[in-house]
Image (cartoon, rainbow, N blue to C red):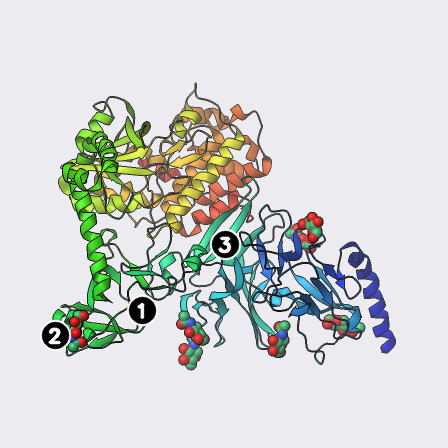
Amino acid sequence: MSLMIMATVVALALCFAPAMGAAATVSARRPLRGNDTLVSAQGRFELGLFSPAGSSGDRFYLGIWYKNIPGQTVIWVGNRASPLSGLASAELRVSADDGNLELVGPTGASASPVVVWSSNRSSSSSLSSSPGSNTAEIRNDGNLVLVDGGNYSNVLWQSFDHPTDTHVPGAWIGENKLTGEYQTLTSWRNAQDPAPGMFTDIIDPNGTSEFFYMWNRSRAYWRSGVWTGQIFERLPDATESITSYEETPAYRRLTNVITDNATITRLVLDLTGQAKLYIWVPATQSWQLFWSAPTMQCEVYALCGAFGVCEHRSQLPCRCPPGFAPVSEEDWTLSDWSGGCRRSSPLTCAHNVSMMDGFLALPDMKLPDGSLAVGAAQSKAECESTCQNSCSCQAYAFSSGGGGCTVWHGEIRNLEQLYADSGVSGSELHLRLSQEGLDILHGADSKKRERTLWFVLGIPFAGVATLGASVILAWRFLLARRRRLASMEYEKGSSLTVYSYEDLRATTKNFSERLGGGSFGSVYRGVLKRHEGDNAIQVQVAVKKLEGLGGQQGDKQFRAEVSTLGLIQHVNLVRLLGFCSSGDEKMLVYEYIPRGSLDRYLFDDGGMNLSWRERYRIMIGVAKGLAYLHHGCHECIIHCDIKPENILLDEDMSPRIADFGMAKLVRRDFSHALTTMRGTIGYLAPEWISGQPINAKADVYSFGMVLFELISGRRNSKGYSEVEAIGSESSDSWTFFPVWVAGKVMEGEVSAVIDSRLRGNVTPEELERACWVACWCIQDEEARRPSMAQVVQALEGVVQVHAPPVPPALQHLVTLT
Ligand SMILES: *[C@@H]1O[C@H](CO)[C@@H](O)[C@H](O)[C@H]1NC(C)=O
Ligand SMILES: *[C@@H]1O[C@H](CO)[C@@H](O)[C@H](O)[C@H]1NC(C)=O
Ligand SMILES: *[C@@H]1O[C@H](CO)[C@@H](O)[C@H](O)[C@H]1NC(C)=O
Ligand SMILES: *[C@@H]1O[C@H](CO)[C@@H](O)[C@H](O)[C@H]1NC(C)=O
Ligand SMILES: *[C@@H]1O[C@H](CO)[C@@H](O)[C@H](O)[C@H]1NC(C)=O
Ligand SMILES: *[C@@H]1O[C@H](CO)[C@@H](O)[C@H](O)[C@H]1NC(C)=O
Ligand SMILES: *[C@@H]1O[C@H](CO)[C@@H](O)[C@H](O)[C@H]1NC(C)=O
């Protein structure tokens, strides 16, 4: 028996020894010192001591990062909460006493080296026969492992059992049922401090397969839903192919299975409390955000700390209400908002009437939880005095509807600014402020009012008298802008500019230069003058005069819907700059995209030929833009009219989707919209014709049709005679091009469908991927079509595309047109 064991040991040692020799390891004899690093065998990951980017470089942590990705992306940190203060005597070594991996070095408190981190296996549980000969290595999946010196296949400790804030393929989060240890992701405290922060991703301690994102380890703000056998109930379908759940007697865990070694992905629970899945895109040398959960920033519980207000429309998620300031400005600049806000002037809570605290009304708020209902208070005044009479009362809300009077004691968390114009109006929260605090605010307010007053009316005299020469300069500046100001305003709560009809008529030289006509009206070129300091720069814009809205679209409704469109920004979407709503005249002002629409490049004989590389980039870009509309926005936006005419090309030939949100704007007259879209019937999914409800999969269908056109360089729905020429054998009956293509793809004759103008200059794998994705997209049954997020993954080669099923019968669609 013992002989056999010996033999195994020797065999194993022989097997592993060469590998161990090749890859550098840490052992008792060979510690890792100072800024030395250890690199995994295939060179993907690197282990060493690092100082967080942007920090003053006086704190050092043991970490693992990608070796070949510029800018250090750290996936694991050992001594999260106990940094070293220098590198000089720092050492990662295997302890000769108990065989643990340990980090020693100077700390602020002690100049002589101390153990700041250890793999911390108690020697009693260690099965290692000769602890002193244990070795540690970094594997190519990013796992730092400590193996038994006497038995290399005995892993004593591994970093995958102790994740930080990042989950990489091959690692797991879950529970070790034997030891009761959990593998959780916990966010960093702030951008420069890896110490455990507020947010944790943990498997349900009650034993189900569900994952929770918890605030302060106590309150769940997002849940994955349970594992159904294929997916987690509440995770988007896009993650179906990459997440997996396993339960054995020893553990239950979520793993991330990317079968493709060439793709680099990571999931990080970041400072905003959102888990974000990133994919490394070598072409752009950047991490591309693939999805995040929760989708909306403000769904993260108490992100902005006590009294902080979360606002999804602003660049920074958190702000303090008027009369409040961040508890720590420094933390806020490092993206740690958890400290929240405090009153700039403390409450007096005096019963002396002249010193009494007052209340500031905050409209459209999502009310915080932890409220107490006060049944006795029947009016707003009674409610206010109830709060006034208790020193711990911080705020009240009163609704004459069902709500009645509610008050809040102690710190208020999870405040969120809502917007009536986006359809979710909140309640009015009355926040208690000291009289002094209110006076300061009112002072500031009245000053602001004065300023706006003379700004608009243009009466400089009072200002000149009091404010002196600087006002004269300001006035000259104002004079130059006065005409503009008189007719333009910024739409409240968004970055859109409101234009008058006259403005846009002047801008477009009386609508003289028509760029094109879409389904919902004509587009004209215009030139706006924008002032930046003393310089006026000219900006080209595209002005779309909407048709077919008639009088049915109310001004308020129109403004509300356009405002939500103004929030949508993505590199592959055309940006909306402003609008005009004057009576029946409704116009949208877009940024001008110089190269015009894709159809001109693709189908015009004289048009410039697009290379395969350009075409493939366009495919991915359009897919990303659509994926953003479908999954990335607050509300799913279905484009409804994807076709080459609505895909514009930027200077560098990257695509921008135009006309998104139109379907929503015109929904009150949808039959009209449908009629105007007749011309594009070749792109419409069967459910349009059969009258079933339309969802995002309708866009997927149209996208599939566009893919075919990008591949073949010809229109799907036009020039059937040309198609006859291609399908020459059956010239007596024409074939709808996609049907013919799908057939060829099924037969494996992918190259037969390619645009002859490319002269075979294509990347075969990309061509096959594009063809297969296109066939999947045009499936009759919506459920079989992939989501746009999956399409992006498939085109980027992140996931494998399987051969599509037998092509759908598209024929009936054609006979309808
Ligand atoms: C490592 O540290 C030494 C001295 O502390 C320094 O000279 C050397 O440039 C450092 N190497 C790297 C790669 O940072
Ligand atoms: C090691 O584990 C013990 C308990 O098992 C704990 O008290 C101690 O803080 C740990 N030490 C380190 C360095 O993690
Ligand atoms: C080596 O370790 C593995 C994994 O723990 C174990 O299954 C095996 O029995 C060990 N071999 C010896 C000779 O102890
Ligand atoms: C776990 O179960 C207990 C008792 O059934 C329940 O009170 C608790 O809310 C559960 N926890 C979670 C996170 O579901
Ligand atoms: C977080 O939880 C800890 C105890 O679990 C508590 O002491 C601390 O006050 C909590 N933090 C906040 C901001 O509530
Ligand atoms: C990925 O790499 C690992 C280790 O290098 C190898 O074992 C595995 O077979 C590779 N998988 C694929 C799909 O190439
Ligand atoms: C009430 O406040 C005023 C103004 O601060 C002060 O003069 C007065 O003495 C106070 N009265 C009492 C009873 O505290």
Q: Secondary structure at mark 3?
A: strand
Q: What distance separates the C-alpha of mark 3 from that of mark 2? A: 50 Å
Q: Secondary structure at mark 1?
A: loop
Q: Which residue is identified by label 1?
A: 412
Crowding near the residue tagged with mark 1, few <14, some 14–19, many ≥20 C-alpha atoms within 10 Å: many
Marks 2 and 1: which is nearer the front?
1
Picture residue at 52% right of the left edge, 55% below the top: 241
Q: What distance separates the C-alpha of mark 3 from that of mark 1? A: 31 Å
Q: Secondary structure at mark 2?
A: loop
Residue 16: percent from left, percent from top: 79, 61
Q: Amino acid at mark 1?
A: Ile
Q: Is residue 410 left or right of residue 166?
A: left
Q: Is residue 489 above or below residue 212?
A: above
Mark sitting earlier along the chain (3/2)? 3
Q: Amino acid at mark 3?
A: Leu
Picture residue at 36% right of the left edge, 38% below the top: 642
**Marker disc for residue 277:** 3
